[in-house]
Image (cartoon, coloured by chain):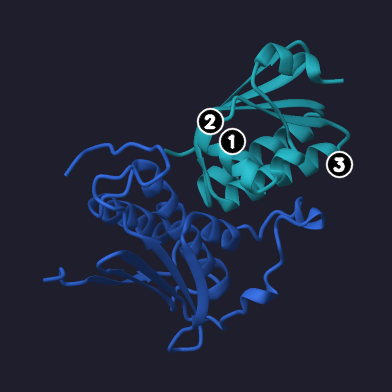
Chain colours: A cyan, B blue
Amino acid sequence: MSLQGTSRETGGVLIVDFSGRITLGDGSAMLRKTIRELNAAGQKKILLNLADVDYIDSAGIGELVSAYSSVRTAGGELKLLNLTKRVNDLLQITRLFTVFDVQSEEWTAIHSFK
Amino acid sequence: MAPKPKRLDVMLESILESVDVAESMIMRISDSAGFTDEECHKIGMAIREGVINAYNYGNRKDRNKKIRMIVELAADTMVIHIVDQGKGFELEEVADPLAEENLLRTSGRGIFLMRAFMDDFTVQRGPEGGADLVLTKKLPIPGSNNGDGGSRGKES
């Protein structure tokens, strides 16, 4: 299933609900395009809800890292919400849990932004 | 008498679609071999990373070059070769993606994931000088849960 994303704004935080796979090709390109548009629109508080993303490969991980770096470079913050077990495990073994702020509750995540 | 080893030898095009083709092929074989759903997922992902490596870095997306995948099912192991037609590489030259200075790199995690998800992973020189990735997984012992607590989607 290719990656799909819908955006909504709550409490000044732009939440993108993704579903599908973030893998080499369409999935990673879709994530890249979304982040590029949010950066261009000046969004500084971005929360990626990955509750319905159950597969990320190395290209998808790279795209998430790229998203994190580009949002920070633009002076914003990017956090992850509701990881599935597989994605959670992947971030653990790649040590990216030490990079990303990973949240498990939307309300808490929204209020964690500065 | 020990069962006869099974062998599959396929030639894949150097196109993005080959990544999904190889992954779904190996997941079907792994399922038939008795691996749990979770193990099938890990093996599928390792092979996915191997074919991405061959497509991106070995053959450099050159459609004139092929990716060969060989699956050998022996008595107690499944060995998968992914062979490209590139220049080959040495494992020692691959940067550690877990090193602090590499955490924000946007690439370079494929080899690490293949190592993490298989029992053994080596790289040797292929017959044409490209990389021959050799990924090995011990076959599950019938009746065991394979130690990962996973469950099979169907019983055979």
Chain letter of the residue beneath label 2 in the structure image: A
Please tell me which residue lies in front, B156 or A56. Answer: B156
Q: Position of residue A112 (x, y in %)?
A: 80, 18
Identify residue type, mark 2: Thr
Q: Secondary structure at mark 2?
A: loop
Q: Position of residue A46 (x, y in %)?
A: 74, 27
Q: Are marks 3 and 2 in contact (CB under 8 Å)?
A: no
Other residues around mark 2 within 10 Å, as few (<14) / some (14–19) / many (≥20): some
Q: Secondary structure at mark 3?
A: helix
Q: Are marks 1 and 2 in contact (CB under 8 Å)?
A: yes
Q: Which of marks 2 and 3 precedes in the sequence?
A: 3
B53 shown above or below B88: above
Q: Quadrant of the N terminus of chain A?
A: top left
Chain letter of the residue beneath label 1 in the structure image: A
Number of the label disc, if any, that sits on residue A73 = 3
Q: Of the residues tagged 1 and 3, which is closer to the observer?
A: 1
Residue B83, image quadrant: bottom left
Compared across the picture, whether B48 is left or right of B88 comes to left
Spatial CA distance of label 3 from label 2 is: 27 Å
Spatial CA distance of label 1 from label 2 is: 6 Å
Identify residue type, mark 3: Thr
Q: Position of residue B52 (x, y in %)?
A: 51, 62
Let me know if marks 1 and 3 both belong to one chain.
yes
Other residues around mark 1 within 10 Å, as few (<14) / some (14–19) / many (≥20): some
Q: Secondary structure at mark 1?
A: helix
Please give the residue where the numbered disc 1 appears in the rendered image: A88
Please give the residue where the numbered disc 2 appears in the rendered image: A84
B63 shown above or below A102: below
Q: Which residue is found at the position 50% from the left and 88% from the top? A: B129
Q: Position of residue B7 (x, y in %)?
A: 24, 71
